[in-house]
Image (cartoon, rainbow, N blue to C red):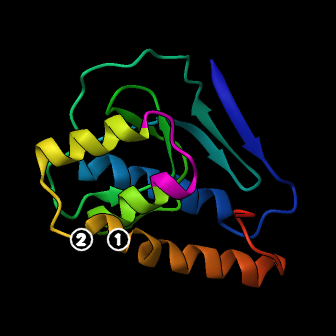
């Protein structure tokens, strides 16, 4: 099955850039990346993902692993869906998961701790890592998100 994202008014190379981002993420290793089936000027087709149950999968150990908006599919496993990626800091990864309300967040944090222990004070730095995405959202929309 295929999941198609399309926008006839998309900017030039919008979907090609998304496909390139997913290719970059896949090459970096670590988490699974949704396969791109086809890409065109106004669409991208991805392999459609089914539901998954929590598992004992472990996170990537690379300290500069790509950070990505993720669909949590297991205790610690994810499939990367959205190519708005960058090579980022682990604390930013955890901050973004918390910001977007990732399911199984406590288990994800435990897995990170087991695989790569956090430096002291990491939890207190989470709001700092969330500041930039919140500021960008506020500049785009004119309001605060999340509401609290």
105 or 68, nearer to the observer: 105
The residue indicated by pointer 2 is 121
For the N terminus, give its image quadrant: top right
Q: Is residue 100 magenta?
A: yes
Determine crowd level at label 2: few under 14, some 14-19, many 20+ residues with C-alpha closer than 10 A: few
48 or 31, nearer to the observer: 31
From the top left corner, tell me how far across and down residue 113 is, in percent: 18, 47
Q: Is residue 7 magenta?
A: no
Q: Is residue 60 left or right of residue 131?
A: left
Q: Is residue 135 left or right of residue 5?
A: left
State the residue at coordinates (25%, 58%): 65
State the residue at coordinates (37%, 66%): 92
Q: Is residue 57 left or right of residue 73?
A: left
From the top left corner, tell me how far across and down residue 18 is, in percent: 56, 57
- State the extent of the magenta-drawn residues as a range: 97-104
Residue 7, visible in the rendered structure: yes
Q: Is residue 104 left or right of residue 114?
A: right
From the top left corner, tell me how far across and down residue 2 is, in percent: 64, 25
39 or 22, nearer to the observer: 22
**Labels 2 and 1 touching (C-beta < 8 A):** yes
State the residue at coordinates (33%, 35%): 107
Q: Secondary structure at mark 1?
A: helix
Determine crowd level at label 1: few under 14, some 14-19, many 20+ residues with C-alpha closer than 10 A: few
State the residue at coordinates (81%, 76%): 143
Say above or below: 84 vs 110. below
Q: Which mark is residue 124?
A: 1
Q: Secondary structure at mark 2?
A: loop
Q: Which mark is residue 97?
A: none
For the C terminus, give its image quadrant: bottom right
């Amino acid at each position: 099955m295929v999941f198609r994202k399309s926008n006839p008014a998309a900017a030039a190379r919008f979907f090609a850039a998304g496909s390139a981002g997913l290719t970059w993420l896949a090459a970096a290793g670590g988490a699974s990346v949704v396969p791109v089936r086809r890409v065109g000027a106004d669409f991208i087709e991805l392999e459609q993902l089914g539901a998954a149950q929590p598992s004992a999968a472990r996170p990537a150990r690379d300290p500069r692993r790509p950070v990505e908006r993720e669909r949590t599919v297991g205790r610690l496993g994810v499939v990367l869906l959205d190519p708005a990626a960058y090579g980022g800091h682990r604390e930013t990864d955890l901050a973004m998961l918390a910001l977007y309300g990732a399911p199984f967040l406590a288990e994800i944090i435990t897995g990170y701790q087991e695989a790569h222990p956090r430096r002291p004070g990491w939890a207190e730095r989470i709001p700092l890592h969330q500041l930039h995405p919140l500021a960008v959202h506020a500049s785009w929309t004119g309001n605060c998100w999340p509401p609290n």
